[in-house]
Amino acid sequence: MKLAVLSDIHGNREALEAVLAEAERRRAEGYVCLGDIVGYGPDPVYCLERVRNLGAITVQGNHDAAAGGAAEVDTFVPNAREAILWTQSRLDREARGYLASLPLCRTLGWLALVHASLESPGAWHYILDLEEASRCFDLMEVPACLIGHSHSPCLFRLSPGDDLSGGLWKRLAIVDGVSYIVNPGSVGQPRDGDARASFALLDTEAKTFELVRVPYDIESCQRKILAAGLPEFLAARLGEGR
Ligand code: ZN
C-alpha cells in the first residue's frame, strides 16, 4: 500500500492542498499524519477537517495537545503561544475534544508513529542528534519509527553492532536487521531552508520511502496570517523555510 506521510501541517491550507494533490498524482492510497495539524497557520479548522476526512492515521502533536486544551500553553515561546490561543478561539468544542483525545503513539504494522520521540512522547523531546535518536531506538519494538516535530527532514539508522548514523535523506529502502527513525519534514512550516512543503511517500510492501518537496502558494498563506492578526514572524518564516 502506498501511504503519504504528512507531519506538521500547522493550519497551512495552501501547503496541505499542494501536498495532497501531489500525493494523489502519485497514487497514494492512504494517509498518515504525525501531528501538529494546527498551530501557527491561519486555517486550523479547514486543515483539521481535511485530515479527518482523509481518514488519516493520526497521532497528537504538541500544538494539537495545547490547542485542544490537553497541554499547558505556557511552555510555548511567545509567537507559538499567541498562535495557539488564536487557534483555540477558532476551534469549536468538538474539534478541541478531537485534538485533545488523539493518541501520542500508534503502531501500524512494522511502523511506530509518534510526533516527537518514543522517549516520554508527551514531553516532546526533539530528535536532532545521535544521542537523542539513540534514546528513541532503545524503546522501539518495530523496525521503523516515523516522527515529525523538528520540521526538518532527517533519517537515523541503527545497524547491527550498534552502528548509529544520521543525516539528510531523499530515498530509503528498509534493510532487514537495521532500525530507522524517519522524519518527512513539515507540510506547513518547513525549517530546513527549503520553503517548499515536505512529505514522504511510503510503500509498505516494498518497504521504501521517498521524500517529496512541493511548491505551494506561500504568499496567499502569508497574507492570511497577517489578515488574521497572527505574528508577522510566522508569515516571514514561511518565505524563508526557517
Ligand atoms: Zn510542529
Image (tube, rainbow, N blue to C red):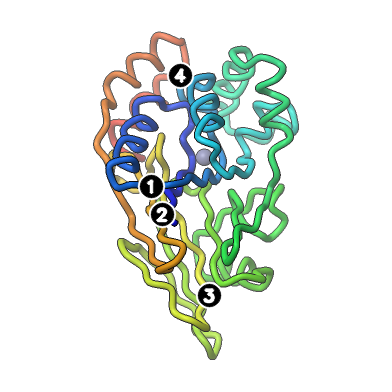
Spatial separation of the CA atoms under disc 2 and disc 1: 5 Å
Query: Which structural element holds mark 3?
Result: strand
Does 16 sit left or right of 86 as displayed?
A: left
Judged from the image, the secondary structure of the residue bearing numbered disc 1 is loop
Q: Identify the secondary structure beneath mark 2.
A: strand
x, y percent for residue 17: 36, 30
* 4 or 3: tag closer to the N-terminus: 4
Amino acid type for the residue under numbered disc 1: Ala
Distance of mark 1 from mark 3, alpha carbons?
24 Å
State the mark number for residue 70: none
Label 1 near label 2: C-beta < 8 Å? Answer: yes
Choose mark 4 or mark 2, whichever is in front.
2
Task: Return the residue nearer the eye: 156 or 192.
Answer: 156
Q: Residue at x 51, y 47 (%)?
A: 32
Q: Secondary structure at mark 4?
A: loop
Quarter of image, res 96: top right
Residue type at tag 4: Pro
Image disc number at residue 179? 3
Residue ID for mark 2: 2
Residue 13 lies, in percent from the top left, at 40, 25
Q: Position of residue 139 (x, y in %)?
A: 68, 69
Residue at x-position 64% and y-position 18%:
88
Q: Quadrant of residue 91?
A: top right
- Whole-number angstrom distance, CA of label 4 to CA of label 3: 37 Å
Mark 4 or mark 2, earlier in chain: 2
Q: Which residue is mark 1?
A: 28
Task: First in sequence, mark 2 or 1: give its number.
Answer: 2
Considering only order in the chain, which callout, 3 or 2, is on the residue closer to the N terminus? 2
Identify residue type, mark 2: Lys
